[in-house]
Amino acid sequence: MRVAFCTSEAFPFAKSGGLADVCGALPRALGKHDIEVVLFLPKYGSIDRQFIDNQVAEHLYVSKISNHFSVYLIEHKEYFDRPQLYGDENGDYADNFDRFHHFCKEVFESLKHLNLPIDILHCHDWQTGLIPLYLKEKYKYDTFFKETKAVLTIHNLAFQGVFSSENFSKIDIQNKKTALGALSFFDQINLLKSGIIYSDEINTVSPQYAREIQTEKFGCGLQNVMSTREKKVRGILNGLDEDVWDPKTDQYLTAQYSSEDYLIGKGKNKAFLQEKSGLALKKNVPLFGFVGRLTHQKGVDLLLNLIKNLTPNEIQIVVQGMGSQNYHEALQNFSKSMSRSFAYVDRYDESMAHNIYAASDIFLMPSEFEPCGLTQMISMKYGTLPLVYKTGGLVNTVKGYDEYKNEATGFMFNEYDIEAFIKEVKVARDVYQEPEVFHQLLTNAFAEDFSWDKSAKEYSDLYQCLLSD
Ligand code: ADP
């Protein structure tokens, strides 16, 4: 079976969040099920030249990762040779519709040019939402794509690719009437909606989020569209790329460690991070870490409140992230006024992120909603207990202390407000001071299996099921 992954991010080529981790790792896990993946990605200016092997056509480059996995990079200098993937300090790039529309069309042209017949077009998020539409409306009578099916994975329903309806005229299909209905969204057009309607199968990245997005609270205006396809929406949990995320082999760390010798290893990493980020060198004060996009979704408002109320000798906090300017300024101010107990890393930096997962004792993830979340899984793998809100994929991956006691793998709060969050931080702080209980929780967290094996099998079954329809 051959599957084409169509995505705007894949690690290590281009990354802004978890989508890249998933598209970098899942194809390799599918290889074990004898599935060949050819992945299509825009050839962004930021991609390291060393990752690119050959030019195979005028605007097409390839990087061969293994016998089962190749990455094709679609070139368009004007659209993709820019410092960022989706926008800059002024907001989203104004021509994002044109950029990703071009990408979608080029996937079809490239496959034909390469003479690579495809069983499944596996699309990821709104950037590729026009691919199922083109498959069904433009290529349905093309023998090359006659047997091809489309799958859409929704990594975050909050990002939908909504554009002015003037762009509709650019879509290159005959039967525009049906398509207009599929794309229309409050006088605009919505590319994710197109993907949802035209795909043969839809899934999202955790079972809990698959249920949530069919409700008004989490449906982001698409809950009715989701509900009409209820039977088709599966939840398949993301996994971790264990070649990238493993404290035993992680080259970014000062000290590598395993679940057996974590006390020494994590201690060294904590001292290194405290020193590097200007925090007071304190062994027995719990260090709380955060790595993520600085958005309301990720709970940054709750974080700011926590930092404001920080009692310096009780806990330390380190936050790494980029995002809204107002969050950035607030965090910068805190890091100046309380530099011995709060540190802020205001950049995208893989190495620093790995160090924060390894050095922290507790990982803060107060997301208001969370399709799956990788950072809570990474932190458990690194022996850092996650503290999360009871939502989405966090429910499927973390066992909270209040409910599970000695079988817990982290901490969970049930009401989305500052009081409940701070109360749970205090619970974590107190449990940290009880070494035996804390050790038990860490042992539980280390024992969790977040490999891709199980989920890759679920994707393989989904493809098989679709092809036998
Ligand atoms: P998202 O909603 O952003 O996809 P996930 O938890 O699924 O959230 O994945 C986030 C990924 O991005 C993780 O691999 C995390 O380590 C990484 N990440 C986020 N912000 C940064 C940053 N500033 N520097 C380095 N890595 C980051």
Image (cartoon, rainbow, N blue to C red):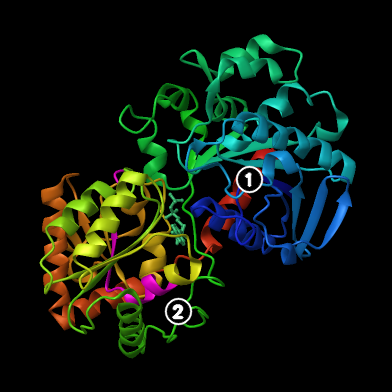
Dot 1 beta carbon under 8 Å from ligand 1:
no
**Does residue 122 appear anywhere in the picture?**
yes
Q: Is residue 437 left or right of residue 117?
A: left
Kind of residue at badge 2: Pro
Disc 2 designates what residue? 247
- Look at 83% across and 23% down and name the residue there: 141
Q: Judge whether 95 appears above or below 343 on screen.
A: above
* Bounds of the magenta segment: 354-368
Disc assigned to residue 376: none
Of helix, strand and loop, which one carries label 2? loop
Q: Residue 84 location, x and y as percent?
A: 57, 48
- Going from N to C along the chain, the mark reached first, 2 or 1, is 1
- Look at 38% across and 37% down and name the residue there: 211
Q: How crowded is the residue under tag 2: few (<14 C-alpha within 10 Å), some, or many (20+)? A: many
Q: Residue furthest top?
A: 177
Looking at the picture, tell me which residue is in the foreground, 267 or 441: 267
Disc assigned to residue 7: 1
Looking at the picture, tell me which residue is in the foreground, 179 or 295: 295
Q: Residue 140 location, x and y as percent?
A: 78, 25
Q: How crowded is the residue under tag 1: few (<14 C-alpha within 10 Å), some, or many (20+)? A: many
